[in-house]
Amino acid sequence: MVYHIVLLTFRPGYEEQWQPLLKALEALRGKISGMTSLCGGPYDSPEGFNQGYTHGLLMTFADRASRNTYLTHPDHEKVKADFLPLVEKAVAFDFAA
């Protein structure tokens, strides 16, 4: 199992794009074999360790090959092209378990 974590902060005025982004990514689940789950939401902790990131995503993939397919999939490239210009900062972190 591979876990793909994305943390992001939208540029000012684009926070309402969170739901469209989540919907666009969810649509990929039906197109990419081995993409087993997707969840995400706005930061929700009183700890304050978010370093300014306001939203997070967690995707799970059956294996590295599925994750790699996702990373280069044309529909994922379209999501990136559509939404990355609206993002101020982002970080992605993957690990296998």
Image: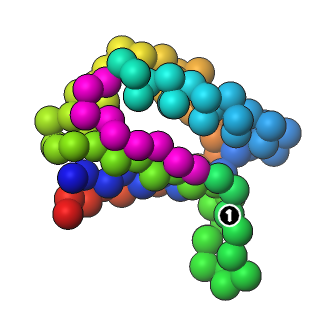
Residue found at x 69% / y 76%: 45
Q: How is the image coloured?
A: rainbow
* Mark 1 surroundings within 10 Å by alpha-carbon count, few (fewer than 14), some (14 through 19), many (20 or more): some
Residue in front for this viewpoint, 88 or 66: 66
Asked if one can make out residue 85 in the rendered structure from this viewpoint, the answer is no
Task: Please report the bounds of the magenta region as a residue range.
Answer: 32-40
- Which residue in the rendered view is the most extreme toward the bottom? 47
Please identify the quarter of the rendering in which residue 14 is found. top right
Left or right for 43, reference 40: right
Percent of width and height locating residue 81? 52, 21
Please identify the quarter of the rendering in which residue 64 is found. top left
Label 1 SS: loop
State the quadrant of the C terminus. bottom left
On whether residue 95 falls in the magenta region, the answer is: no
On whether residue 34 falls in the magenta region, the answer is: yes
Residue found at x 31% / y 30%: 70
Percent of width and height locating residue 83? 60, 29
Percent of width and height locating residue 8? 59, 51
- The vertical placement of 96 against 86, above or below, is below
Residue found at x 69% / y 56%: 42
Identify residue for label 1: 43
Total number of numbered discs in the rendering: 1
Give the amino acid type for the residue marked by disc 1 in the picture: Tyr
Residue in front for this viewpoint, 96 or 12: 96
Left or right for 60, reference 84: left
- The vertical placement of 55 against 21, above or below, is below
Residue in front for this viewpoint, 4 or 35: 35
Asked if one can make out residue 30 in the rendered structure from this viewpoint, the answer is yes
Residue found at x 42% / y 16%: 75
Left or right for 80, reference 22: left
Report the magenta stretch's main SS. strand
- The vertical placement of 51 against 46, above or below, is above
